[in-house]
Every structure is written in C-alpha cells, then in structure tokens.
Image: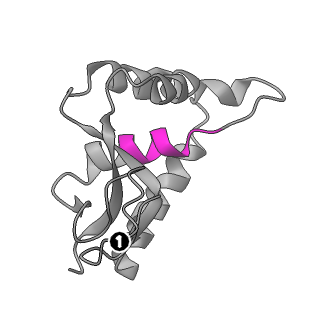
Amino acid sequence: RRDVLYIGHELDRLQKHPWMQARFNQMGGKYLEWFSKASQSRKILNCGLTGGSRDMMLKLLDRMTSVLKDPAIAIMTKEKEEINVNMAALNWILYNEFIGRFTGNKPMHSQYKKYEKSRKDVWFIHK
C-alpha cells in the first residue's frame, strides 16, 4: 500500500526496556517524558527494516532528520559522547505522528531474533 510505512516490530515492549530507556535518557526532554508515559502495549519498532512508497519514506526521513537535529536533545550538549538515538527517534515519531500509517510483522518479516530461516510466508527473515 502506498499510504503505509512498513516497519520492523520486535517482540519486546517499548515501556521499561533497558536498552530503549537508555536511548530515551540520552534524548531527554519531551522525548523522555513521552517514553515514561508510553502505553505498555506498544512494541519496539526497529529501524533495521523500514520501507514504503517514496512519498511515505520521504515524510519519515524528513521527520527523522528534524528530530535527530533537535538541539534540545540532551546528549547534543555533551562533548565526545556517542550518539545512538535513531531507534528512540523512530519510535517517538511513528507512535506520535504516524499512528494508523505503519505496519509490520507478517507478511513483512518473521519474528525478531527467532531466526526463522525456513519461513516462506514473509518478505524478510528478521535475524
């Protein structure tokens, strides 16, 4: 479908996930506030599998660029710090601005980190 983004979904929930918590801590501000209140039913969305029509991808990339350049991101004020917030940015953007306009799992990909190499009913084997 031309009006949908295809995004990898992980099995883990976004809320209280230690790796995602660390990324949202690096972002701080409104991003961390949103994360702390995010619905416990939301799954982690994964940048590793991302696709869609040219128009939808350009919309997403425009928003990703804007968020990743946001001078209010906490880690941006620290020198010589590794910045690794793309997954947090993607989740914040999609769950706030693209609700109802993204999908994942079957038929796009297999279950994350289940190494389901024999599946033929999905486009990608997700690890």
| Amino acid type at image mark 1 | Ser
Residue occupying the point 49% across, 53% down: 64
Q: In this view, does 107 lie above or below 84?
A: below
Where residue 51 appears, x then y in whole percent? 39, 71
Q: Is 86 contained in the magenta span?
A: yes
Q: Is residue 60 above or below residue 114?
A: below
Q: Residues within 10 Å of mark 1 (few under 14, many from 20)?
A: few
Residue occupying the point 49% across, 27% down: 24
Residue beneath disc 1: 118
By secondary structure, the bulk of the magenta-drawn segment is best described as helix
Left or right: 39 in relation to 31: left
Label 1 SS: loop
Residue occupying the point 68% across, 31% down: 76
Where residue 60 appears, x then y in whole percent? 41, 62
Q: In which quarter of the image is residue 122?
A: bottom left
Q: In which quarter of the image is residue 38?
A: top left
Q: Which residue lies furthest to the right in this view?
A: 80
